[in-house]
Amino acid sequence: MMEEKIVNNEKELFGFASFDKYESEHIAAPKYSYWKSVWRTFFRNKFTVAVAILMLVLVLFALIQPSFSGYDPLVAPNVNKEEMRFVKPCAEHIFGTDNVGNEVFDVVWAGAKNSIIISFVCTFINMIIGIAVGAIWGFSKKMDKWMIEVYNVVSNIPFLLLAMILSYVMGAGMGTLIFVMCVTDWIFVAYFIRTQVMIIRDREYNLASKCLGTNTWTMIKNNILPYLISVIMTYAARMIPSLISYEVFLSYMGLGLGVTKASLGRMISIYTSYMNGYPHLFWIPVTVLALLSVSLYIVGQRLADAADPRTHM
Amino acid sequence: MSNEGREVILSIKHVDVTFETGHKKKLVAVKDANFDVYKGETFALVGESGSGKTTLGRAIMRINPCSAGEILFEGKRISGKISREEDRNVVRNIQMIFQDPAASLNERATIDYCVSEGLYNFHLYKDEADRVAKVDKALEDVGLLPEHKSRYPHEFSGGQRQRVGIARAMIMNPKFIVADEPISALDVSIRAQVLNLMNKLKNERDLTYLFIAHDLSVVRFIADRIAVIHHGEIVEIAESETLFEYPIHPYTISLLSTVPMPDPLVEKNRKHIVYDPSKLDQSGEPREMRELRPGHFVHCTSQEFAQYEEKISQMEREQAERES
C-alpha cells in the first residue's frame, strides 16, 4: 500500500524531459551595453557626482554670466569714483571691486569664459589631429621612421620661445593663442597614440581582421580606437586643465590675450600688486581658477576610469 | 591510396621563413618546406612548441612573408607581391581559424559585426536583409542562436567563441582553411564538439583543411595525411594510418612514443624514446625528402634512406606475419 503510493508520487513528480540542443546556448545574463555601463559606473560614486555638478555650475556660469554683465576690460565707468574702488566683498559687491572700480565678480567670469573656450578648442584640435596622425603613425612602419625624426625636432622646440615669437609676429589675440597652443602640442598626443596603437596593433584579433581582408582605416575605427577610449579620455582630462593654466600663464607673462579681452591670467598679474592691501583681489580669481582646473581634472579622470570596461563588473 | 591524379589545391615549394632577431642575426623558423595539399583532404602539421608549424600556417595566410620559395594556391602564386584582385581572391578563398578564441575576437564589437566583418569588406550581400540572413545562417550552422548577435565576445564560453571564429571564417565560403590549433585552448569536454563541427562543415562544403596541432590523438582522428615538423624542417609526410603504423624517422618515433593511451598496462610499460639527432648520419650529405613508399616521404640522406628502407620492409614483414 505504502509502496504503491510512493510509485504514484514518483509518476506525478517526475516526467521525461525533452532534449533541446539550443537550451545550453542561451545566455542568461542581461544584455551588455558599453555606454550605459560607463554612465552607471560614473554616477555610482557620490563624490564624483558632486564634483561634476560643481564643474557644470562653474563652466555654465562662466559661459553665461559675461553676456549679462556685459563686462568690457576697456570700459571702466567707476574709475573716477574714489568710493567705488577697492571695495571689500560685501552683500552689494559679492567679490568686491578692483583698482578701477569694476566688479571683480564680472571680471572673473569674463576671464574664466575666455580661458575655458581657449582650452576646450585647443584640446579638441590637438586631440583630433593627434589621434588621426598617431593612429596612422602607429600602423605604418614606413611612416614611423621619418615621423620619429619630426617628433624629435618639434618636441625639442622651447615652448615659451615659440610662444613669444609667434605672439610678436602674429599679434596678441584669441586666434594667436589658440594657434600657439596647438602648433606643436598635437605631436605629443600623436606620439602617445602611436605607442598605444603599437601595443595593440599585433594582437591576434587584428591578425584575424587582416585575414578577413579588413583595410587599415576600418581596423583603426573598429579594432583600435574603441580600445583607446579610456586612455584618450585620461589624456584629454589632463589636457583641458593644463591648457587653462597655460592660458593664464601666457597672459600673465603678457603673451596671451590682448588688452581688449578679459583674461584671468592678466587680471591675476595686475591684482598681484595689490595683494598686501587687498588680498581678496588676488585670492578670488586664483580660487576660481583652481576650482575650475581641479573639478575638470577630477571629472575627466573619473570618466576615463568609467570608460575602462574592467570597472564595469 | 595513391596521390596520382588528385587535384592539388595548395602547393608549398621550398619555403623558408626567417625572422630578424637583431642586427644581422636571423632566426630560420621554417626551412625548405615542400609539400602539396590535395583538394578535399585534411592535412595535419604536427610538431612540438616552437617547431615552426604556426609560422608556416601564417606564411600561407601571408601574415609572415616567405624569405625563399613560393606558395601556390590553385596553381597561382600567392606569396610575395600580388595584384589587388588576386589578393582579394586569396582572402576570400583562404581563411583561418585561430588558436585562442578569447584573443582572436574583437572584444569591443558585437558578434554581429565579428561574423559579418568579411561580408562588409567584400560587400558579399545584396542588402541589409540579405546580410542579416547570411549571418543568421552562419550562426545556425555552428549551433549558435540569432539572439547572440547583439552580444559581446566576453559573454560567451570558450567553445561558443571558437564557433563564432569558425562562423566568421565560413561565411566567406572559403575553399581552404588553415586551422591553427583550433582546439588546444578549449576545455576537453567541448573539443569533440568543435572537431565534429569542423568535420561536418568540411563534408558539407567540400573544404580542405590545413590542421596545425601538437596533440597526436586529435590529429589521428581528424587528419588524412600528416606532416611532422621539427625545428622548422619537415621530417616525415605520410597518410595518417601509415604514419602511426610505420613511423620511420627517429623524431616521429619519439613523438609517437609520447601519445598517452587510455590503458593502464600500456602506460605502465611505456618506454619514452628520446630523439637524438647526433645518431643520424653525420656524413654531411644534404638531406632531402625521399619517397620511401608511395605517399610516404622521409627527410634523409641516401645512407639513412637505405637504413629506413630495410627497417620498413622488416616492419611490413612482421605485420604480414601477425596478420597470417
Image (cartoon, rainbow, N blue to C red):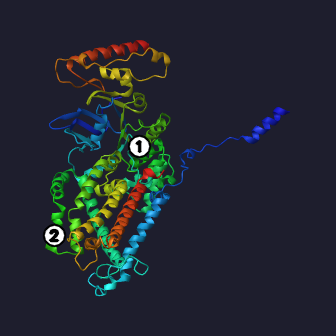
- Measured Cα–Cα span from mark 1 to mark 2: 54 Å
Q: Nearer the viewer, residue B73 or A82?
A: A82
Rendered image quadrant of residue B212: top left
Q: Specify the quadrant that holds the N terminus of chain A.
A: top right
Percent of width and height locating residue A56: 42, 69
Q: Nearer the viewer, residue B160 or B45?
A: B160
Pointer 2 local density, CA inside 10 Å: few below 14, some 14–19, many at least 20: some
Can residue B89 be seen by looking at this rendering? yes
- Say which amino acid is labelled 1: Pro
Q: Residue at x 35, y 17 (%)?
A: B273
- Say which amino acid is labelled 2: Leu
Can residue A39 be seen by looking at this rendering? no
Apparent side of residue A178 relative to residue A112 in the rendered image (left or right)? left
Give SS at disc 1.
Answer: loop
Give SS at disc 2.
Answer: helix
Q: Residue at x 20, y 19 (%)?
A: B302
Task: Please tell me whether residue A150 is drawn above or below residue A124 in the rendered image.
Answer: above
Task: Please tell me whether residue A262 is drawn above or below residue A22 in the rendered image.
Answer: below
Q: Chain of mark 1?
A: B
Q: Give the labeled residue for mark 1.
A: B101
Percent of width and height locating residue A39: 46, 60
Rendered image quadrant of residue B206: top left
Label placed on residue A166: 2
Percent of width and height locating residue B85: 26, 54
Is disc 1 in the same subunit as disc 2?
no
